[in-house]
Image (tube, rainbow, N blue to C red):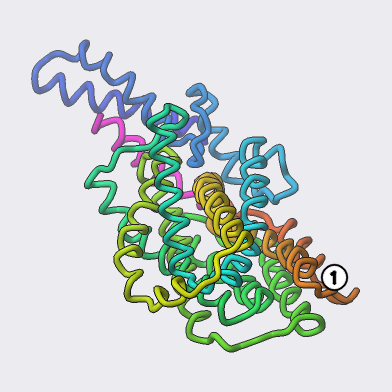
Amino acid sequence: MEAAYIHAINYAKMVVVAATADSNGKSSCIMKKTQPAAAAATAVMVDAEKHPLIPQGKAIAAHDKDDEQQPSLLDVKILGSRTFFIILYYAFCSSLMLVINKLAVYYIPAPTFILSTQLGASVAAVLIGDWAGWLVADRMEWGKALKFVWVVVGFVGTLVANMKVLQNANVETFITFRSSTPLVLSVCDYIWLGRALPNIRSWSCLVVLLLGSVGYVMVDADFKMTAYFWLLLWYVFFTFDTVYVKHVCDTVEMTNWGRVYYANLMAFVPLLLALPFMNECAILMSLNWNFYSVATLTLSCFLGLAMSHASYLLREAVSATLFTIVGIICKVVTVIINVMIWDKHASPAGIAFLLVCVLAGTFYEQAPKRVVNKQQHQDLLLAVACNR
């Protein structure tokens, strides 16, 4: 296969040189210009997860190797140390975020106000950090803003529905529904994001993950279906948000703090305008503000910023399905924390089902990117070389 790539690159150089020589007789000059084009064509084949560029002779082999690899969360060497630490960072934020939001809604029964405060605090933190030189965030640009409109639709829709589900159902019910999303996202990865379908081992892990969650609910949890509408709405928004944001991370060049700034700012403005119409003003006016309400709200703002930052880092590093599975494992840890906080003790059978969920998610193997045939690779290389 490597010989075919090299042949395609050399052929591309010959085509560009010949066409230009026929038109103006300056082939020697163009030959020099085709060298960057050949390098650019080779760079196209470098791993799509934005690993550093490697020498031309090794780029093709590395790309083919990456396509064959299907890392699980245990394959640290294949995932890379950076991706592994991003997963740990995200896991820490995600495991605590659901519990803190549950506490915040408990002390301040105004989910839209809580969400608006979190978004506004994140925007302020990014602006201050950028002004002080602690981080780099992209300036607001019309072209990027247009692409982020649908990101914000999915982001706000998911968060609002999430808050409403937590207000009307328990955490265990929410996690059970979330455990079924990887089955849908695996198909979405295949259709829209260029991934192959999972192998037999991974499909089995996804099914076991769902069954483990259902088993826990059946033996140990108080399953409450009192929020049908909000659960269904969350499911739709979450699936769209996961797929579309992964697409944006892959196609729109931005810093990670820039993504955090765009998403939070563009979500904060409409929510702030809608806040007076959400029937929460009377609740806030009559609320007995105390240390616990202020502390949980403040902590949720800090975690909201960290969660947003970690989320975009992980979305860029892994597939949409693996991103969701990491989130589910974190939510299983959340159940354990939730049990301790709310003075509820899981039975041995319940704990066993939770461990099944963790193991199933851990052994899931990320599906590789689909490999196109040799002729499509050659056509791609020729197109890149000729258009440079």
Which residue occupies 36% across, 28% down?
40
Q: Position of residue 166 (x, y in %)?
A: 58, 74
Residue furthest to the top: 28
Q: Quick one: which residue is furthest to the left in this view?
A: 24
- Residue at image position (59%, 41%) is 66
Left or right of 335, for residue 309:
left
Q: Quadrant of the C terminus?
A: top left
Find residue 301 and report its horizontal and vertical position in percent: 52, 53
Q: Position of residue 29 (x, y in %)?
A: 20, 12
Front-lying residue, 167 or 89: 167
Residue at 25% across / 31% down in the picture?
386
- Asked if residue 45 lies left or right of residue 16, the reply is right
User: Camera-side residue: 307 or 200?
Assistant: 307
Q: Residue at x 71, y 61 (%)?
A: 361
**Residue beneath label 1, please?**
351
**Circle 1 — which element?**
helix
User: What amino acid type should be assigned to the residue bearing mark 1?
Assistant: Ile
Start-end of magenta stretch: 370-388
Specify the principal SS of the magenta part. helix
Q: Is residue 49 magenta?
A: no
Magenta-drawn stretch contains 387:
yes
Local crowd size for mark 1, using a 10 Å CA cut-off: few (<14), some (14–19), many (≥20): some
Snapshot quadrant of residue 385: top left
